[in-house]
């Protein structure tokens, strides 16, 4: 009787064993390339978005290194002979009543306006997110107290609320930033509370509790990462609103003390000469409007991608 014939075992070559890893890397690189192509296509097909990004890049550069764009001192470099001169090759944005270069003051005033807006937005983001997540996750009487307080604050116009807070704290750009940040807290509380209630209803939250995870771990591991998209879109939108509010308060005299340049105070100083020296208010006003519109355009793009 003949012995049974065993099936032969074919061992794949060494390079075949590495093929799945290569395919995974290829897919990953393909996904990155695809995202890059979509981003480039979005910039090409949406010139408004490209213009907003370029303007924000210029504003960031002015904030970080204003001296790289102008060598003229915005406060002490006075040219009385060129007082209230219009835009020219020597003074791109003209000069003010004291002969100071308006372009230099706009560039150097960017740092004050932008940093104040970042402080205000950060304050609103941190405090509002903590209160919103806590209220939405804990619920009960704490949620009721926070929600009713937010409803009362939302009923008050944000500029009026900012003026009330800065009147208590005192004048100055730092106090103005804090006041604007306090006025922006209710918006972040409402959006983070809504996102927390939505996320808390998912099944994986109950599964996490069943696995023995604590509340803090669930909040930091599941709730905050999933709510971050909506919160950061609101933060980008709120940054433009903070710039506008800070400029408005500075225009009313609550902000920086002259002669320190700041966009809102520059518009306020230039309104006295608006009939004959339009550039004193036009260029700082264009800077404010450009940054607000750019921040809104970018936040709208992020919001559309999130949906």
Image: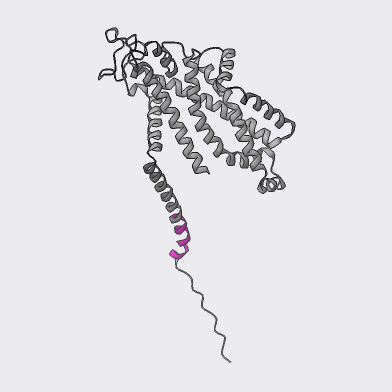
Q: Which one is in front, 297 or 204?
A: 297
Q: Which one is in front, 222 or 214?
A: 222
Q: Which residues are magenta?
A: 15-25
In this rendering, the answer to whether 217 lies above or below 285 is: below
Instruction: Check the image and name the residue furthest to the top.
Output: 80
Q: Which one is in front, 129 or 279?
A: 279
The quadrant of the rendering that contains the N terminus is bottom right
Residue 81 point in image, percent of width and height: 27, 8
Prevalent SS, magenta region? helix
In this rendering, the answer to whether 142 lies above or below 47 is: above
The residue at 44%/68% (across/down) is 13
Q: Could one spot residue 186 in this view of the protein?
A: yes
Say left or right for 133 vs 260: right
Residue 289 point in image, percent of width and height: 42, 26
The residue at 42%/50% (across/down) is 34
The residue at 37%/11% (across/down) is 273
């Amino acid at each position: 009787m003949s012995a049974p014939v065993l099936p032969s075992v074919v061992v794949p070559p060494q390079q075949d064993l590495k093929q799945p890893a290569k395919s995974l890397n290829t897919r990953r690189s393909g996904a990155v390339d695809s995202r890059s192509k979509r981003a480039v296509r979005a910039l090409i097909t949406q010139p408004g978005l490209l213009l907003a990004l370029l303007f924000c890049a210029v504003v960031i550069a002015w904030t970080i290194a204003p001296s790289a764009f102008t060598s003229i001192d915005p406060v002490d470099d006075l040219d009385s002979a060129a007082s209230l001169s219009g835009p020219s090759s020597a003074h791109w944005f003209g000069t003010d009543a004291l002969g100071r270069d308006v372009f230099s003051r706009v560039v150097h005033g960017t740092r004050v306006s932008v940093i104040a807006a970042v402080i205000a937005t950060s304050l609103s983001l941190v405090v509002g997110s903590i209160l919103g997540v806590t209220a939405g996750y804990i619920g009960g009487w704490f949620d009721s107290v926070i929600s009713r307080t937010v409803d009362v604050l939302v009923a008050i116009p944000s500029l009026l609320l900012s003026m009330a807070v800065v009147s208590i704290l005192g004048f100055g750009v730092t106090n103005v930033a804090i006041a604007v940040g306090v006025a922006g807290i209710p918006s972040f509380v409402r959006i983070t509370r809504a996102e927390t209630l939505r996320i808390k209803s998912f099944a994986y939250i109950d599964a996490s509790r069943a696995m023995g995870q604590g509340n803090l771990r669930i909040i930091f591991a599941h709730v905050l990462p999933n709510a971050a998209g909506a919160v950061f879109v609101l933060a980008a939108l709120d940054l433009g609103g903070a710039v506008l509010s800070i400029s408005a308060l500075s225009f009313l005299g609550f902000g920086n003390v002259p002669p320190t340049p700041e966009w809102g105070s520059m518009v306020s100083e230039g309104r006295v000469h608006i009939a004959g020296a339009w550039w004193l208010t036009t260029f700082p006003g264009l800077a404010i409007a450009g940054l607000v519109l750019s921040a809104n355009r970018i936040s709208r793009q992020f919001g559309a991608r999130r949906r």
